[in-house]
Amino acid sequence: MTIILHIARRDNWEKAEASGQYCADTLMSQGFIHCSTPRQIIPVANTRFRGEKDLVLLCIESEKVDADIRYENLEGGDDLFPHIYGSLNPDAVVDVLDFKPHADGTFALPQMREGDDNGNNDLPG
């Protein structure tokens, strides 16, 4: 099982659960949903979401995602990020974790539930 992660606003995720599909803002503007590996998620969070509240971390089992997932870097770096090219089917989300910043606005990876392992030791614990 390979777990990829996506930072979502809590209200957007709750709407997705009710509607049966999750469409991040970037799906409309860039054509895909940005995701990260567990190793990549904290630098992304601290750069793009610093200090934001009411966020959740979606733990996505990539094998269950209906849409195409491509690992790529569109900003010219060497690190490849998972991008979901289409809406995310909620049944691919195996865990939803509160994702709260510390007092200084930075993030740390929350404790993953027992059994959330992607098989390549990319998750802590």
Image (cartoon, rainbow, N blue to C red):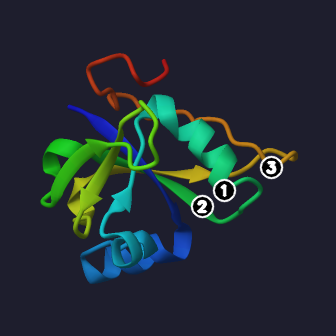
User: In the rendered view, would you say 105 is above or below 37?
Assistant: below
Position of the N terminus by quadrant: top left
Q: Which residue is mark 2?
A: 55
Q: Given the image, on which type of amino acid does mark 1 rest?
A: Phe
Whole-angstrom CA distance, mark 2 to mark 1, is 9 Å
What's the residue at 65%, 66% (across, down)? 54
Identify which residue, 8 or 125, lies in the foreground: 8
The amino acid on which the numbered mark 3 sits, given as a three-letter code, is Gly
At 71% across and 63% down in the image, what residue appears? 53
Residue 49 marker:
1
| Element at label 1 | loop
Mark with earlier residue (1, 3): 1
Name the residue located 24 percent from the left edge and 76 percent from the top edge: 20
Q: Toward the viewer: 86 or 65? A: 86
Left or right: residue 20 compared with residue 27: left
Marked residue nearer the N-terminal end (3 or 2): 2
Distance from the alpha carbon under mark 3 to that under mark 2:
13 Å
Q: Residues within 10 Å of mark 3 (few under 14, many from 20)?
A: some
Do the CB atoms of the residues marked 2 and 1 lie less than 8 Å apart?
yes
Image point 27% across, 64% down: which residue?
Answer: 90
Looking at the picture, how far across and down is residue 91, in whole percent? 22, 60
**Which residue is nearer to you in this view: 75 or 79?**
75
Furthest-right residue in this view: 104
x, y percent for residue 60: 31, 48
Residues marked 1 and 3 touching at CB (< 8 Å) = no
Residue 113 shown left or right of residue 62 in the figure:
right
| Between marks 2 and 1 in the image, the one whose residue lies nearer the viewer | 1
Percent x, y of residue 10: 54, 69
The image quadrant of residue 49 is bottom right
Query: What residue is pinned by disc 3?
Result: 105
Q: Residues within 10 Å of mark 1 (few under 14, many from 20)?
A: some
